[in-house]
Amino acid sequence: MMATPKRKKVAVIGGGISGLAAAKAFDQQGHRVCGFERSADFGGVWELSRSYPDVQTQSPKDLYCYTDHPMPDDYPEWPKGPQVHAYLHSYAAKHDLARLFKLNTTVKTMQQAKGGGWTLTLNQGGADWDEHFDFVTVCTGQFSEKNIISHPGQEAFIARGGQVMHSSEYTDPSICKGKDVVVLGGSKSATDIAVNAVNSGARSVRMVYKKNVWRLPYFVGGINFKRLLYMRAQELQFNTWGKTPVQRAVAAVMKPLVWANFRGLETLIKLQLGLKKHNMVPTTPIEKEVSCSVPLVTPGLFEHLNAGKIKPVIGTFEKYTDDGLKLSTGETVPCDLAILAVGWKLGVPYLPQTYQDKLIEEDGQYRVYRLAVNPDLPDLGFVGFNSSFCTVLSAEMVANWLVRFADGQLADQPDAAQMNANIDMMLNWKRNERPAAQIYGGLCSAPFHFKHFDELLADMGATKHKRGPVGEYFSYPDYRAYGEYLASTPHYRVG
């Protein structure tokens, strides 16, 4: 019988989706939780001052919720930013999580403490202080630090009255009215902003991006995409990790059928969206590309492309000129407003380089077991590193796994050697078998949601039966079912 774990003082860094999940998980087990959020509000990427107009989820609402707190019935299938923000506040209120957090508080740095745990240097209102914690949970995710870039001639462009901003700074659509807008990037945020700029009265809108990627319509041939790409039966067709010899043999036999399935999906998407007409057909097979970087099609995008209101350009910015913006294609286009939808810097900036060297390999891939812990950094864990298409459920699953790992209560508690062996196997798979899995430093569980959750649940000792063959193989992850799985894990309280 496992010994009763001791009560810990736990730091939770970040008050977004992952921070709220972690705070609830550790508090529920009886730990003393101290949360720190650098902004004045909960919400992370959904905090209203960080949201651009018309932002909405890429995932349907029943895939974007905590297991014990469904989104309201009157929310649309894909909720808007303010609705998600309100939902997160309702979750925090339901579990009284505000009492655990200090807002407007920044983590400046952290150091391993003698005897275990970490000492955090914190700042609030200009005052610094050091505080020791037995365990630290990093929940700042992958969208915390803006990726700021510049191009030659930018200062002179701004001096002449031009504007350059990161996509997260695009909060007032009125700035587009009557202007020539150029958006750099081809992600979901880029297409959202391009569509919004047209709708806000921009004189012209161009979207400049480096390569074509597969874009998924919310409905593929009239079918909600969650019923196509979120199924275990579909997931099994991707080249997953850790296959047994028998599984590899079955995959070899099924390869022609899998090939035909994905070619059919590609054809349907190309015809439905008219990708060829706009020179937007990707060169990479869809099954090799699906990951967290595959965007959903912004409503109105292809309508505006068809009308010529958004002009796509494959290339990048070269320099700002007196006549506008010169692109790598050699073309100079008119530009009053440049919006850089170039994403975020991945990393943990408050973690000193000595520790980052243990966490991140030379090629940028992260050494994390179950996308949650590094064996060379004890008393430290990550929630929200397992990016996916069902972000909220993924965060909650890892948060529950992490508290049990920290307390030594996993049914299969790994040692350092086991974790390193698994990490090396996963890194080899990402580098040599599925390069798309290297996106975001390898911190993406999509499209392998089911397998990732299976591993976490097995570690936790879940005993609930699955949903039967139809529900298990031909339906998307059900938050209610995963709530039952979590409830079936062995219960304990810290002493």
Image: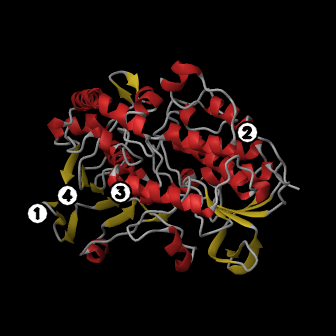
Question: Which corner quadrant holds the C terminus?
Answer: bottom right
Circle 4: residue type: Gly
Image location (x, y in percent) of residue 465: 65, 26
Circle 1: residue type: Gly
**Label 2 sits on residue:** 489
Question: Answer yes or no: do the residues labelled 2 and 4 have beta carbons within 8 Å?
Answer: no
**Label 3 sits on residue:** 431
| Disc with the residue nearer the chain's start (3 vs 4) | 4
Classify mark 2: residues with Cα within 10 Å, few (<14), some (14-19) or many (20+). Answer: some
**Label 4 sits on residue:** 315
Q: Residue furthest right?
A: 495
Circle 2: residue type: Thr
Q: Which is in the foreground here, disc 3 or disc 1?
A: 3
Circle 3: residue type: Arg
Residue at 52% of width from left, 72% of height from top?
358
Image location (x, y in percent) of residue 294: 36, 44
Residue at 73% of width from left, 34% of height from top?
488
Q: Secondary structure at mark 4?
A: loop
Q: Secondary structure at mark 3?
A: helix
Residue at 41% of width from left, 51% of height from top?
173
| Disc with the residue nearer the chain's start (4 vs 1) | 4
Say which of 352 and 85 sits in front.
352
Q: Is residue 390 above or below residue 44?
A: above
| Disc with the residue nearer the chain's start (2 vs 4) | 4
Image location (x, y in percent) of residue 295: 37, 43
